[in-house]
Amino acid sequence: METHELIEESLLTLTLNKARTFLAMLGVIIGIGSVIALVSLGQSTQSSITNQIQSLGSNLLTISPSSQAFGGVRGGESIQSLTLADAEALKESTLITTIESVSAEYSSRGQIIAGRNNTNAQVIGVLPEYQTVRSVDLSSGSFINQRHVDGLSKVVVLGTTVATDLFGENSNPVGQTVRIDSQVFTVVGVTASKGGTGFNNPDESVFIPLTTAQKILYGVDYVGSISVSAISENVMQQAEDQITQVLLNRHKIRSANDADFRIFSQEDVIGTITSVTGTFTTLLSGIAAISLVVGGIGIMNIMLVTVTERTREIGLRKALGAKRKIITAQFLTEAVMITLIGGIIGTILGITVSAVITNHMDLPFVISLKSIILAFSVSAGVGILFGWYPAQKAAKLEPIEALRYE
């Protein structure tokens, strides 16, 4: 029997009982659709977070406090080891030749109130250099300047989302006042939107002078982190080494292994997030793939029922000279076609679901060609794996016994 004849006959057989064929496909459709949708959503989330991090600057280094290690054993609690003086030392050190700007920061959550409107936002105490280091653009007004820092001024720059929440769309709040934890601040600027959500989103933050945050709002003498921009991406490692040496000298620590701070580059953060989201996506996809196994078992059951119903047909074919391999090929082709058609429908369903969800969540739409190829490969594999036994059972029937079957 020619291949095209085998396919035509398989299609004809499958369309004779459309409801049974669809139910056999259903498990494969759900499994393939779920895997493609989850992989796509995982990659879309990863792409969104990566874009947000890179928008802060590819040459950014972030220094954070860490529990100090003694003899290679690190303590369990983080200490407040960084100060504004550390940031000033990094700016002025002659040992550091690879950095462009330095900004110390302190942040905390706070309630922002304007009239009857209020919102909870990240309150970040910054230096003027923060605008350069973190690539902050303004839609109106001006950013924090050195005069504000020196004078402990109560001024604030609003993130665009915060400004909208407090003053409404298309408003210009510059010159208006807001209250942050009972303190009155004058709005001097509004940032341009960077988009995205989470991960210290600047759109959902407000910025005040670092000294004001330390001495008026929170009463602290340390900083939460220090941001440093290197002169280029090519000297990131050299900049990290120079910064480490200066801070070790200032903190009177001999070995980098015992340091009471940690330095992260944007690549480090992206790598960590990629690893986490990748693992999570793989886990969810693995769970979704279980339905493929269930669907395969359903296909095998349907094919076994089909073999039973067509026992006399099989006996007649064998009596007329049909070889065992022809009978095997016939039933195997039917099983593979069920899974391939189910795979096509599942792929379309998965892409559609992913497109709808990413559009609703304002995420970039990402579809991996590898996941689609994998979907079809798995579809064919499921068909062959779970169709083989019914096909073999049909092929092994004795012609006379099959013809006698009622």
Image (cartoon, rainbow, N blue to C red):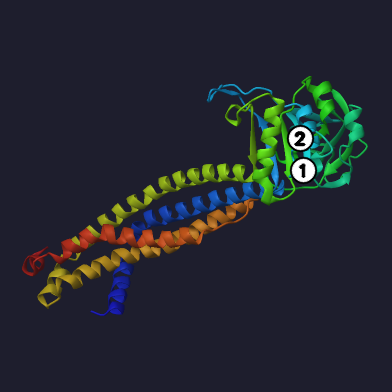
Task: List x then y, in percent, for residue 59.
Answer: 70, 47
**Is residue 18 something one can see in this rendering?**
no
Residue 41: where, in percent of width, then height?
55, 50
* 221 to the left or right of 144: left
Q: Are there few (<14), some (14-19), or many (20+) residues within 10 Å of tag 1?
A: many
Relative depth, front residue between 258 and 163: 258
Q: CA distance from mark 1 to mark 2?
A: 14 Å
User: What residue type is disc 1 on?
Assistant: Val
Figure label count: 2
* SS for dot 2: helix
Q: Quadrant of the N terminus?
A: bottom left
Q: Residue at x 65, y 39 (%)?
A: 241
The numbered dot on residue 90 is 2
At horizontal 45% and vertical 52% (from top left) the residue drawn is 35
- Residue 391 spot, x, y in % from top left: 21, 63
Is the residue 110 above or below the residue 266 in the image?
above
Q: Is residue 356 left or right of residue 388?
A: right
Name the disc covering residue 133, or none.
1
**Residue closer to the observer: 341 or 98:** 98
Q: Is residue 116 above or below residue 282?
A: above
Instruction: Give yes or no for contact between labels 1 and 2 (Cβ–Cβ under 8 Å).
Output: no
* Badge 1 or badge 2: first in the primary sequence: 2
Amino acid type, callout 2: Leu
Say the numbered circle drawn on residue 80.
none
What residue is rendered at 63% in x and 51% in y? 363
Q: Is residue 303 left or right of residue 75?
A: left
Look at the image and tell me in which quarter the C terminus lies: bottom left
